[in-house]
Amino acid sequence: MKKLGFGTMRLPLTDRNDPASVDVKTTAEMFDRYLAEGFTYFDTAYFYHKGRSESVIGDLLVKRHPRESFTITDKLPIDFLHEKSDVQRIYGEQKQRLGTEYFDWYFMHAISRERFDTAKELGVLDFLAKKKEEGEIRRIGFSFHGKPEELEYILSDYVPELVQIQLNYYDWFDSGVESSKLHDIAVKHGVQLSIMEPLRGGALASPPQEVKEALAGIVPGASPAEAGIRFAASMENVMIVLSGMSSMDQLTENMAYMKDFKPLSKEQLDKMAALNTLLDSCTRIKCTACRYCVDGCPMKIAIPEYFELYNKSEIFGMRMAFTGKYKKLSETHGKAKDCLSCGACEQVCTQGLPISSLMAEVSAKFDK
Ligand code: SF4
Ligand code: SF4
């Protein structure tokens, strides 16, 4: 199987403000072209494009192409399950939207330790095993969003045939995601991997100029997108790398280097993984997260964490992941706007940062 998977969570739209307004004509052309070039793997989920992703796959693939000429991976949204009967109801709805008799891969969606326990309590594992026995599901997996220790907890209990994790050269060592640890745990348990966010939502397709230049030295002749996707595809046990392609141009570019995929060398991979330091150094607030300032803040503001979110949003653009983390942190800490400009933190800051004025900038971004 070719290693470029078609992620259908960012399909072209006719109205950019309405995720359900999938541009069916352009999508049909992209799907047909992808199949014509010998690629086969489509990834969808219950709520992508407000549910339209599944029905678009049903209309454009299942109805128009031989079912064995492509594979569908769909996902059960564990957060939508409140009682056992919800499992069969949503599963049935998905089959109906797709118009398919079977799923090539069927995942539990966005599994964390907590969601895995919920899935077990609601009998999801037994349900999936039964559907597999009946031939409606060919292979079982889960997509994972959590910390490495949670993945270890789950895989020590249950080993599926495929696990989907976030992996890219920035997150390889990033303390928020720790792709390298997730990867190594999966390999240790002998699990094949599907990779999501190889370009971090598209951000690594156009990184800062310094990073572009460094990449050109490591993978000569490759665009940042090519280098990023080949980084993920070169890792051990990686079966497929998903790209959420939104235009024919993106699809054409990705297929050109993934048609006859050439893995990067160990040296190239190591050099790319080290670029996270350069990416971080392109950031505006040079906080080293030493935490000297934290205890003295009368408003219990999460100073280094807020600076990290600010920096990431400067590199990668404002994203739900950052606003969500800020919101969660500010439930137990002062918000950036609560800063009293008392200066206690600035007196101890090891980097001499003008924390109170920087906090005003953080607030302008996050306290809306
Ligand atoms: S200046 Fe703001 S962030 Fe710094 S200690 Fe005072 S309240 Fe906390
Ligand atoms: S003391 Fe300065 S460098 Fe250290 S965590 Fe606080 S803001 Fe960051």
Image: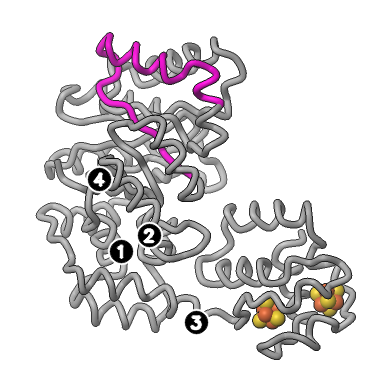
Residue marked by disc 2:
199
Which mark's residue is nearer the viewer, 2 or 3?
Answer: 3
In three-dimensional space, the C-alpha distance between marks 4 and 1, rounded to whole angstroms, equals 14 Å
Residue marked by disc 4:
240
> Which residue corresponds to the image point at 28% horizontal and 49% vertical from the top-left?
241
Q: Are marks 2 and 3 in contact (CB under 8 Å)?
A: no
Q: Tell me which amino acid carries mark 4.
A: Ile
Marker disc for residue 270: none
Q: Are marks 1 and 2 in contact (CB under 8 Å)?
A: yes
Residue marked by disc 1:
228
Q: Tell me which amino acid carries mark 1.
A: Gly
Q: Residues within 10 Å of mark 1 (few under 14, many from 20)?
A: many
> Which residue corresponds to the image point at 50% horizontal and 50% vertical from the top-left?
147
Counting every numbered tag in the picture gives: 4
Tell me the SS state at disc 4: strand
Given residues 84 and 117, the one toward you in this image is 117
Give the mark nearest the N terminus, 1 or 2: 2
Figure quadrant of the N terminus? top left
> CB of residue at label 2: within 8 Å of ligand 2?
no
